[in-house]
Amino acid sequence: MSKFLLLFEQSYISKLKTKSFYITTLIMLLGITAFFMWPTISGWFSSNEKPVTITVADQTKGSAISYFKNNKKIIFKPAKQSVKQEEHRVVTGKVDALLILSLKSGSQLDAQLRTKKPFELNTQQMLEEQVRSAGQLFTIQQLKLTADQAQRIIDQKTNLNQKVISPTADKGKSSQQKTTATIVSYAVALIIYLFVLSYLSIISSEIAAEKDSRIMEIIISSTSPIVHLLSRVCGVLALAMTQFTVLIGAALIMARVLQSGKYWHLISDLFSSLTAGYTVFAILFFFFACVLYTLLGAVLGSLVNKVQDVGQAVMPVTMVLMVGFFIAISGMSNPDTLLIKIFSFIPFTASMIMPMRIGATDMSLWQGFLSLVLLGLTIVGLFIFSLRFYRGSVLTYTNGSFIKKIKQAIQLSK
Amino acid sequence: MTLTIEHLTKRFQDFHAVDNLNFVAEQGEIFGLIGQNGAGKTTTFRMILNLLAPSSGTIKWADASVHTLNRDMIGYLPEERGLYPKMPVEDQLMFFGRLRGCSKAALKAEIDDWLERFYLSDKRKVLTETLSKGNQQKVQLIASLIHKPRLLILDEPFSGLDPVNAGLLKDAIVSLKKQGTVIIFSSHRMDHVEELCDHICLLKRGKSLFTGAIIDLKKQFGKINLTIRGPFDEMELSKIPGVVSVAKDKDMYRLLLSHENDARPIFQMLTTDGFIERFSLDYLSLEELFKRKVASTLV
């Protein structure tokens, strides 16, 4: 067996057997299960909740109260007594709130809510939605329209059909496609962020521990530092891909099995609206991001003296990752800003941002390709650079800045 | 097979970690590299191991550059322990053996044999971190020689070992020497160096102060270490011509002479009144020589 395979196996298998790997995978699987089972789980917690009872004092002399529909959370009851008496019932806790409906400016519905204590956000939002809807229907009613006419106004929806008339430009994507790509890109950015964050620290700690315990000296006296570096990077990448495959596999099985396959159809619809080009780019960016940050983690791990220094060493990289992730989030509302465009070409953040631009904007694909090439070149550059000082860095135990350590490591590597 | 080091120099900018070092370690020989902390021992080892490139000079194994040879022929025990704490002892030895190119089947018998020799058979499934410091050191030593290296480098192998385990380790080293392995080792324990080594290189700030057989170093100073026991007075002893210093050691006196030839008249003077219990003339110990040579201090 070659030394690369031996070191790779040792790195991969030893971590695969650790309790921490099982525990993190299990926690993530529980998270995925909770996501798919959410309607059931939320039902467990909400089933015992008593709905709030709201007395409606309708002063519109119309039938505004009829627009309020009872649901699991809110029950509306018409007021039978005066406002003052109804307010007293609220104060004494017999009902949860009093909703007073009145006319404003002659034809508009005005609603006032009186409660003993503020409602929960969810109830508040549901009530606001009911009031808004009731207000619309009431106004339509005031216009003396027929029920059919009113319904047509409410259901009215005009689609904007965009057609690019330039013969050189492509057709562009529909807003549905863009929205789907934004959601998927957000998921890709989140996965990259979570995976890279955890595996960055795993590889840094592994190499720092080997350096700290002097195992590194024994290994690189037996084989070349390049073999060691590559075996560790590949070992950790294989571990990341194993966990990723397990989680995606479990998610797909759950989507198919749980909730009568409802999520399976949702996912199918989601992916069917994505182009093949987008999917390929997203996968490549995800993989390249994992390679870049794993390599970076290995280099940082080789520069610290002790395992406990790893957290401090990877902190700047974590910050860069956070910046990339938050910019990706900002892109969900508008993926066409200059900030997004700039960061989609910076190799350290491109993987979280460029997939969003590819899917959610009408930019040319060459930009995505250029960003991918830049990311690839950065990986190659970092690998070549790390080879220059990796041998020396694992023998450097001095304190000082990373620049000083790198300089010393390069000198030792000569 | 011979390890030959010629004009070996390692500079870090203006600092000479190793300066024009020359020595030859023959097959079946134990060669000691001794010196204070920072003398350049570990740097020399790292150059032999190809972890550091020499600034100038050559390191040859049987007339070929050591760096062109298969690395699996070398065994290395670093000064600080290099073991995976969460790995069981047997897996650890299997890993390091395979790293040096041995097959699993061949290693199995070797592991059994070495664990038995070091009284570690009952620890084979135990995690390394749970072992005592001495046992970890024994595992480290087995890991460095499990693949039957032709060149074995031992950096402070006796560190952390009690006398019993140190004895076991010495036996193992001597056994390897008999099998023809070239062994280079460094130690601060001069008694171990004196007991095991045929030749030494004495380093001070990267420079060799002496290279050759221990006996030749001793002969440079001659037999000036005199031990006597009898009814003597320390003050009177110090006044004897040729006596450089007198030190009382329990019921004996240790006299340092300026020259070996002074011993004879001193013997006659001390035995004028007849019988004395002890009169022993010897070379300086390696520790005393080390202090004289390296630290430039008198005993």
Image (spheres, grey):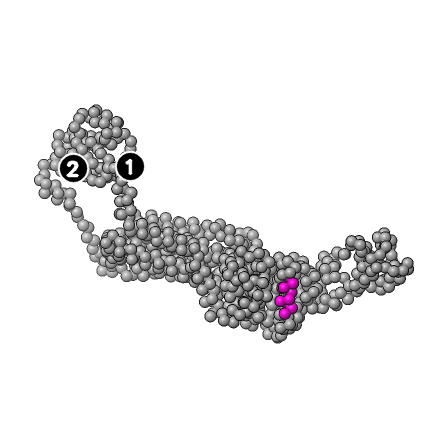
Q: Amino acid at mark 2?
A: Tyr
Identify the residue at image location x=59%, y=74%: B64
Compared to residue A396, the image places residue A117 above or below, namely above
Q: Is residue A200 left or right of residue A277?
A: right
Which quarter of the rendering shows the N terminus of chain B? bottom right
Compared to residue A361, the image places residue A7 above or below, namely below
Q: Give the camera-side residue of A27 and A63.
A: A27
Identify the residue at image location x=18%, y=25%: A82
Q: Is residue B79 left or right of residue B210?
A: left
Identify the residue at image location x=50%, y=60%: B87
Tell me the chain of label 1. A
Task: Give the residue pinned by disc 2.
Answer: A67
Compared to residue B255, the image places residue A6 above or below, namely below
Q: Position of residue A116 (x, y in %)?
A: 27, 29
- The residues bearing labels 2 and 1 have C-alpha atoms spaced at a distance of 22 Å
Q: Position of residue A14 (x, y in %)?
A: 45, 60
Task: Answer whether residue A326 is magenta in the image.
Answer: no
Q: Which residues are magenta?
A: B166-175
Task: Give the residue pinned by disc 1.
Answer: A120
Q: Position of residue A34 (x, y in %)?
A: 31, 50
Q: Is residue A189 left or right of residue A82?
A: right
For the stretch drawn in magenta, the main secondary structure is helix
Q: Pointer 1: residues within 10 angstroms few (<14), some, or many (20+)? A: few
Q: Residue furthest front?
A: B122
Can residue B86 be seen in the rendering of this structure? yes
Identify the residue at image location x=75%, y=56%: B297
Dot 2 or dot 1: first in sequence order is 2
Q: Amino acid at mark 1?
A: Glu
